[in-house]
Amino acid sequence: QVQLVESGGGLVQPGGSLRLSCVASASGFRVYAMGWYRQAPGAQREFVAGVGSGGVTKYADFVKGRFTISRDNTKNTVSLQMNSLQPEDTAVYYCDRVVNFPGTMAAGAWGQGTQVTVSS
């Protein structure tokens, strides 16, 4: 069972930036596709961005051009650089393995998530 620990969330004004990080406790991290998901209050969890084992990336339409996902296999870490944040980006952000990349299905081993709040 992979354990995931997300960090980097916080309160930011519209137009601001945040960088989220996720550390995975998995010896086979480098072969996994990893993704970021988010869940806003009253909404279902949704796919935000994914990165395959070879570095190929995929983004939800609503974040293209604003968010960048990356991975560091030496540190078992996947990061999400978020720029031009808007109030509608407010959510709890989670990372997880993506079991069918370039699909968007998460493995379901959710961590505690990290809260991102975009507000003036």
Image (cartoon, rainbow, N blue to C red):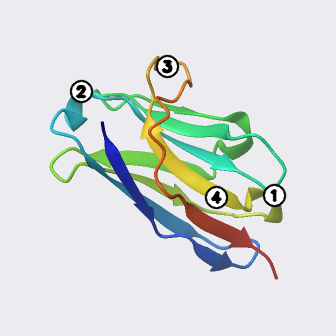
Label ID, residue 34: none
Residue receiving disc 2: 31
The answer to which of marks 2 and 1 sits earlier in the sequence is 2
> Pointer 1: what residue?
88
Q: CA distance from mark 2 to mark 1?
A: 33 Å
Q: Nearer the viewer, mark 4 or mark 2?
A: 4
Give the residue furthest to the front. 1
Look at the picture and state if 110 lies above or below 14: above
Picture coordinates of residue 53, whole percent (x, y)? 29, 28
Disc 3 versus disc 4: nearer the observer? 4
Give the Cα distance between marks 3 and 4: 23 Å
- Mark 2: few/some/many CA within 10 Å (<14, 14-19, 20+): few
The residue under the point 80% across, 56% down is 41
Mark identifier at residue 102: 3
Amino acid type, callout 3: Pro
Distance from disc 4 to disc 1, alpha carbons, whole Å, reads 12 Å
Q: Image check: 66 left or right of 110?
A: right
**Do the numbered discs 3 and 1 sit on residues whose CB atoms are within 8 Å?**
no
The vertical placement of 113 against 7, above or below, is above
Q: Splitting the image into 4 quarters, where does residue 29 fall?
A: top left
* Residue toward you, 87 or 40: 40
Instruction: Find numbered disc 3 in the image and state the secondary structure of the residue it sits on.
Output: loop
Please name the residue shown 74% across and 42% down the image: 62
Residue drawn at 76 percent across, 73 percent down: 14
Q: Amino acid at mark 4?
A: Val
Q: Residue furthest bottom?
A: 120
Residue 1: image location, x then y, percent: 30, 36
Marks 2 & 1, CB-CB < 8 Å contact: no
Residue at numbered disc 4: 92
Q: Earlier in the sequence, mark 3 or mark 1?
A: 1
Mark 2 or mark 4, which is nearer the start of the sequence? 2
Mark 1 neighbour class, 10 Å CA radius: few under 14, some 14 to 19, many 20 or more: few
